[in-house]
Image (cartoon, rainbow, N blue to C red):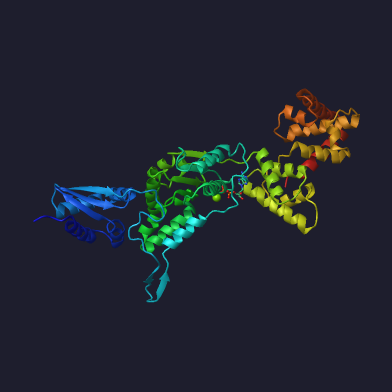
Amino acid sequence: MTIDSQDIWSKCLGNIKSKIGEQGFDTWFKPIKPIKLDGKVLTIQVPSQFFYEYLEEHYVHLLRNVLNEELGNDYKLEYSVVVDKGNEFNKPYIVNLPNNGKAYSKGNGHSIAYTNPFDLQTIDRERQNSNLNVHYTFDNFIEGDCNRLARSAGVAVAQKPGVTSFNPLMLYGGVGLGKTHLVQAIGNEIKKINEKFVLYVSSEKFTNQFFEAIKNNNIQEFSNFYLQVDVLILDDVQFFEGKEKTQEIFFHIFNHLHQNGKQIIMTSDRPPRDLVGLMERLVSRFKWGLTADLQQPDYETRMAIIQRKMQADGINIPENVIEYLAYSIDTNVRDLEGVLISLIANASLIKKEVDLELARETLKNIVHDIDSEVGIDYIQKTISEYFKIPVDQLKDKTRKKEIVIARQIAMYFAKDYTNHSLKTIGDHFGGRDHSTVIHAVQAISDFCDTDPSFKKTVEDIRKKLKLKNV
Ligand code: ADP
Ligand code: MG
């Protein structure tokens, strides 16, 4: 009697079914096809590399036992993996992908229409919109020292997704520093250039979808859906911490996509090594490609961001206000944007131009823990107002006594209140050299020591400057 692979596999299936849960059986064993029984080797066909790995990792003992029971100890199992042919939309890996929604009934007896979120129509729709916000582009992502590496890696990935060694690309940094903007810019750029299936998903949404899939018994559709993606953008992966099942499924999706040259892009609020609630093997994969951080924007970048945002909104705000804001809000870009929005709203509400006073007022009302550092321009402006002399005269060569004194006081405060070097301070005062600044600082503190009324003047100005401290 010859043993047919079909028969023997049916027996194996019956045996497996009695040993594992229905869901595991449906997901991982139903899609398998027996190919042949050649001598002592049974070959089965699995729909993907991912499938094969999953079986090997989770069901290897079960398969061994079942094979022993049905065939005998000396039989071997071989897998034939259906190779992915470019993952074209019409030729998915999918085995038994249901076409449409199905109905299921809940305990109360009412039948509820349930739409499978991973059916073909959904896939088609997701393929179209990719969950990307078209406003997040490279063009409006201001480059600075704080984000240069992350941004240029992003550009490289956008040009050649899956091809560079930046796979996965992992961007991390605190809240409001531009992670989401940057990864979406990558996605938008890729879609501009080619036809790839780009998908942006927050880790929270991924987790919820996965839980739904478990509940509704369509884990297979869930994974098959993600296996078709060419560029997977997973935002805020720290959300996976402590969620083992979700990590597990993502691990396999990750492996599969990576092996097939698909691009994976992730963000996290901290470096991979600090993601303590994640499986070690997942974290180690995160480090395969490139990890780059986004830091708090430096002063120049903040200036550029404000200018750019104002320009985009067609709003003019004076240079000194921009400088003042850039100095005052150094936490993150989101805070900066928040202040700008309030400022513009205030200005239109009271029908007033945006000026320093309004900026100060606005800031006072919304930000309480800002850095108190003031800028040189701001100091110069305050002093020119105090002495009623034009700012220009602080910078030019005028040697009139009262101008010289005002200029020296401004230099004194610039040294006191900013972190600028003596040279930079000198540059702000008409290109004077550092020894002039040293001399000014010394002269003012000497005057203060010897002349109480002079000291009072200086303290008065200090108070005005400190008004900024809200
Ligand atoms: P994260 O995801 O890191 O919390 P987001 O990407 O949501 O931060 O950024 C917060 C806001 O700041 C967004 O509106 C974004 O457009 C803006 N933003 C962040 N970085 C920059 C940048 N370098 N240039 C322009 N806008 C930026
Ligand atoms: Mg974000």
Question: Image height check: is 64 above or below 400?
Answer: below
Residue 165 locus on image (x, y percent)? 45, 37
Residue at the extreme left of the image, as rendered:
1
Residue at the extreme top of the image, as rendered:
435
Q: Quadrant of residue 162?
A: top left
Decide which of 286, 9 is in the foreground and name it. Answer: 9
Decide which of 23, 262 is in the foreground and name it. Answer: 262
User: Does 26 sit left or right of 404 as displayed?
Assistant: left
At x 81%, y 40%, the residue is 382
Query: How many numbered discs, if any?
Result: 0
Decide which of 410, 200 is in the foreground and name it. Answer: 200
Asked if residue 287 can be seen in this view, the reply is: yes
Which of the image's four quarters has the N terminus?
bottom left
Residue 432 locus on image (x, y percent)? 79, 26
At x 42%, y 61%, the residue is 120
User: Does 414 sit left or right of 200 as displayed?
Assistant: right
Q: Quadrant of residue 289?
A: top left
Question: Image height check: is 220 above or below 84?
Answer: below
User: Does 442 sit left or right of 170 as displayed?
Assistant: right
